[in-house]
Image (cartoon, rainbow, N blue to C red):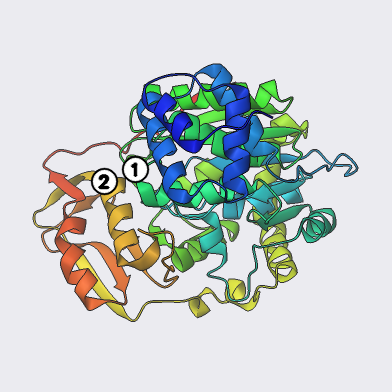
Amino acid sequence: MTRFTAVELIEAKRDGLSLSPDAIEWLIGAYTRDEVPDYQMAAMAMAIVLNGLDDAELSAWTTAMLHSGEVMDFSDIDRPKVDKHSTGGVGDKISIPLAPLVAVCGVAKPMMSGRGLGHTGGTLDKLESIPGFTTALSPDRFREILIEHGLVLAGQSETMVPADRKLYALRDATGTVPSIPLISSSIMSKKLAEGLDALVLDVKTGSGAFMRDVERSRELARTMVGIGNGHGVQTVALITSMEQPLGREVGNASEIRESVEVLRGEGPTDVIELTLALGEVMLELAGIDGGRDRLQTAIDDGSALTKLVEVTIAHGGDPGVLEDTSRLAVAPHEGRITAPAEGYVTRCDALVVGTVATRLGAGRERKEETIDPGVGITLEAKIGDQVGVGETLARVRYRDEGKWEAHQAQLASAWAIGDAPVDPPRLIIDRIS
């Protein structure tokens, strides 16, 4: 292979030139081997944010990421292999109730998830708020759990898409998250490495999404659907709203609590609706009859919650916290945001809520930071709700008094209250296939 230098490739992309497949293959390989340092790859990522990748570059970039490590082969597992991925949202815990639901219905779900990115939470961070739950699995253990339970809830191992594992954390810490080429190649390289038959994408749009404009969200969806179908994986995307947080809980342990509520037949209506809608598409792509009725039965008879408990045990987690969710972590202090006037909530800004949750310790602002699983925000009022003066809009659990004092006013700015009733934003906006 022709040898390049990182500087010449950064300069080329900075100047709007196209990179050859050989150049991209060399760059991704060298970065994976630590021959290109983080600061140079950060510069390349920023150049891509500013100038993009054309179709040929994106294909080469995704393929290089995919083949930077081991690609799983589950062709010997006699179940349709279908996964779901969200582009990231505030309060988006959908994967946690959805995964056991579809597994009970006959889908094999080899879920390889990510950590919190920017102001959005990460499925791995939420799962690891369950004491003992291990998401770092060897490929052999990944396969064993999938075969036994029809479901595995893991992160990227050292051998699966290592280039993306490194780049994902770097983007979070360098302001290079909101880029269609970087988002799509990151997501799709991981998904294609899972050995899937089909994939359902939940592409967020709105204030709390990385793509705030619905047309940009459609562009991202079309890009990823094209990558998936081009690699022989049947791919469908739903465009869904992230104008306000999903559900009532934002935080790691608190979102596990809410996920368990959903599997008990309770929980917020928006979380339930999106879980069932995505599950319905997954069953459709798997060729499994029954759709929403079958999913609802798995909630009603308790089999989906039982599946989550079984998989938690397989991952080394404490199943007792799912049976008694009060045992999950809770930060020691509680604050409140109250309504300054009576009326109807017209805005509950997901970006502001997610940003404050992150700054209080529920997420990372730098990749070396650790997450506090007990930090969380409970939303008592969302768009369309009627409130009175002094009524609680949110309850906040925090550990650091200084951080709460610094960010209390910012969190209060997430809500707007008007005189006239308003409807909540439409949850599911479009389907791209």
Q: Where is residue 126 in the image (x, y as percent from the top left)?
A: 52, 62
Q: Quadrant of the C terminus?
A: top right
Dot in front, 1 or 2: 1
Position of 26 with respect to 269 (left or right) is right
User: In this picture, is 82 found above or below 111?
Assistant: above
Q: Which mark is residue 421?
A: none
Identify the amino acid type marked 2: Asp
* Tag 1 residue: 208
Circles 1 and 2 in contact, beta carbons < 8 Å: yes
SS of the residue at dot 2? loop
Q: Residue at x 29, y 36 (%)?
A: 423
Q: Which of 104 and 163 is in front in this view?
A: 163
Mark 2 nearby-residue class (10 Å; few <14, some 14–19, many ≥20): many
Q: Where is residue 86 in the image (x, y as percent from the top left)?
A: 52, 41
SS of the residue at dot 1? loop
* Tag 2 residue: 349
Q: Which mark sits nearer the N-terminus, 1 or 2?
A: 1
Q: Residue at x 38, y 39 (%)?
A: 209
User: In this picture, is 293 found above or below 400?
Assistant: above
Write down the quadrant of residue 341 in the picture: bottom left
Write down the quadrant of residue 123 in the picture: bottom right
Q: Quadrant of the N terminus?
A: top right
Mark 1 nearby-residue class (10 Å; few <14, some 14–19, many ≥20): many
Position of 163 with respect to 167 (left or right) is right
Q: Distance between the residues labelled 1 and 2?
A: 7 Å
